[in-house]
Amino acid sequence: MKRYLLLLALSLPMATMAQDEIPAAGPASIAYHEYRMKESVPPYGLAKVKALITKINDSEETTALNAKDYLGLSLREKFTYHMIHAESYSQNCDIVLPEPDEEKKIFAYLPSVFGDTHWSSRQLDFFQSNRDSVLALIKESANRSKRTGLNYKHALMEMHAVEAIPFLAEFYQRDRKDHDILTLLMLLMKESRYAPFLSSASYTKLYSKESNYFSYLQDNKANEDLIIKRATDFYNSRK
């Protein structure tokens, strides 16, 4: 129940909360939380795209690029645009604070991306209509920067990119640091209703009626290897 207090703290006066109710996140947890929240910035036409986004931000009428400017972008430039700018405004954005021992947890869900905005239907359609190209650009960018940013993970989730499982598994094992890659692997299995995963103790702990947004598995090599094996088996079962 203490994990719920992290969100509750945003709406209650701090004076009403006992200081010992919420363990403070240490430096390692805060650093890992910042690492989790980082977005990847593709280099393709970046200066041009940023100039167009500045033009949008200077306007009080829209949060989306107009059709003429949008159609004037190449596919790679559109990829950059979508990855650094979300076109739809949302008022239902929860701020998630760092958790104690966050770096030692494999969470059930990915953190939200883009704050109070989210991808529009035009942007989601782009991902689906160009999924092979989007996946190739994510791989290319991630391999160059050695990071799979939060926006890339969300794009792969939106595309339900099961075909990315081998890449994600291999990428994670390079340094075993970004546990949200494991979260993404589990979400792909969950959304695909992969029976061996649905019947597992991990699924029950993370996604049952008793679970919540902050549910997690303890990070250790056994859990990491098990998630990767299950995801790999799932991928191979579809071939």
Image: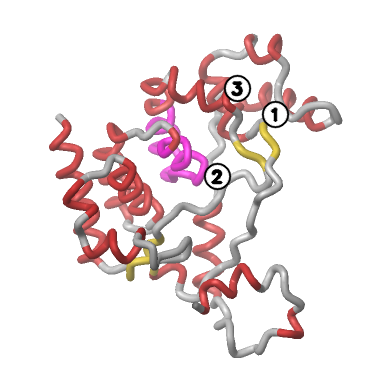
Q: Nearer the viewer, residue 24 or 61?
A: 61
Disc 3 residue type (three-letter): Gly
Image mark count = 3
Q: Residue at x 38, y 37 (%)?
A: 143
Is residue 21 one of those drawn in magenta? no
Q: CA distance from mark 3 to mark 2?
A: 17 Å
Disc 1 residue type (three-letter): Lys
Disc 2 residue type (three-letter): Glu
Specify whether 52 is left or right of 160.
right
* Label 2 with label 1: CB-CB less than 8 Å: no
What's the magenta region?
A: 137-157
The residue pinned by badge 1 equals 50
The residue pinned by badge 2 equals 39
Q: CA distance from mark 2 to mark 1?
A: 15 Å
Quarter of the view holding residue 227? bottom left
Mark 1 or 3 closer to N-term? 3
Q: Residue at x 27, y 69 (%)?
A: 220
Residue 80 spot, x, y in % from top left = 57, 27
Q: Nearer the viewer, residue 60 or 1?
A: 1
Mark 3 or 2 closer to N-term? 2
Is residue 152 one of those drawn in magenta? yes
Q: Nearer the viewer, residue 173 or 200?
A: 200
Specify whether 88 is left or right of 178.
right
Rendered position, 205 above or below 163: below
Rendered position, 117 above or below 48: below
Dominant SS type (magenta)? helix
The residue pinned by badge 3 equals 45
